[in-house]
Image: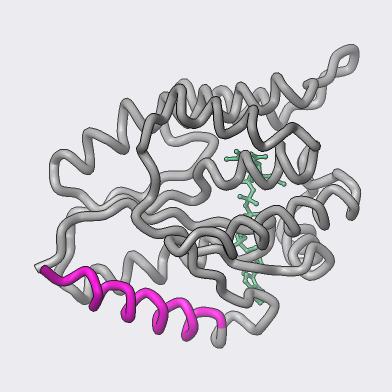
Amino acid sequence: MIKNKFIAIEGLEGAGKTNACICVKNILKKYNIKNILLVRQPGSTPIAEDIRKLIKKQFNTDNLIKETELLLMYAARIQLVEKKIKPALKNGAWVISDRHDLSSLAYQGGGLGIKKTKITKLKSLFLNNFIPDLTIYLDVSPKIGLARASKRNTLDLIEKRSLKFFNQTRKCYLKNAKLDNKIITINANLNIKKVTQNIKKKILDWLNKQVI
Ligand code: Z5A
């Protein structure tokens, strides 16, 4: 038997998070786990989805300053955690989230340069000790990831940022992944079949360690 968990999937755009979420969900189903909630951040509640639209919208006479962007990401996250994730976990569901607070550390911290101390303070103030049981970080080079993302659709406001921004974001992801044994790093530069195989292997190893 395995107690229900909260799993986050992280990475730059085009890293393959959508594929990873489906892959994790399918593995859980093989373990006969049926009660699974899939969410994305920012989003997955009506208010958080509106915040998502606001973050991605281009304004003619105004633009988001980095602190506002960080606070909006957190507002959406807190709304989702309190309204959906915590109640689902309490009801025995497994939760898979496409991004969580590591995204804020990487994008608004690493990418935009907001101090880590400020972000961790925000995290401890509003999320308390609520952290994912496991984070799968899909490490992709920005050039490869953005090429994949741009093939799929036109780039949004964040996706249009410079390569320097994404290199700094990735550096921050890698640094934090090294420091935290609840984060598993997967090489997402490889082809989708290989990446999927590696995710499967890592998640099965992890699940076997969770059996009680
Ligand atoms: N953001 C933030 O700044 N701070 C925060 O705290 C949070 C978020 C929570 C969310 O937008 C934006 O918000 C995001 C970060 C920021 N901004 N940016 N830029 P989003 O949800 O629209 O963006 P995303 O999360 O990056 O989604 P994405 O672009 O869809 O990435 P993905 O889910 O990782 O990619 P995918 O859909 O799985 O794959 C993209 C394409 O690549 C698709 O056609 C796949 O078939 C293909 N693909 C995937 N893997 C492979 C491999 N291995 N080989 C070849 N092709 C592949």
Q: Position of residue 35 (x, y in %)?
A: 18, 54
Residue 49 showing in the rendered view = no
Position of 157 with respect to 163 (left or right) is left
Q: Give the range drawn in magenta.
A: 195-212
Q: Was residue 208 drawn as part of the magenta stretch in this picture?
A: yes
Position of 79 with respect to 2 (left or right) is right
Q: Residue at x 15, y 65 (%)?
A: 2
Q: How many labels does the image show?
A: 0
Q: Position of residue 181 (x, y in %)?
A: 45, 64
Q: Is residue 23 above or below residue 159?
A: below
Residue 5 showing in the rendered view = yes
Q: Where is residue 120 in the image (x, y as percent from the top left)?
A: 56, 34
For the C terminus, the quadrant is bottom left
Q: Was residue 197 drawn as part of the magenta stretch in this picture?
A: yes
Q: Residue at x 67, y 37 (%)?
A: 116
Q: Where is residue 179 in the image (x, y as percent from the top left)?
A: 56, 59
Along the line of sight, the residue nearer the viewer: 203 or 192: 203
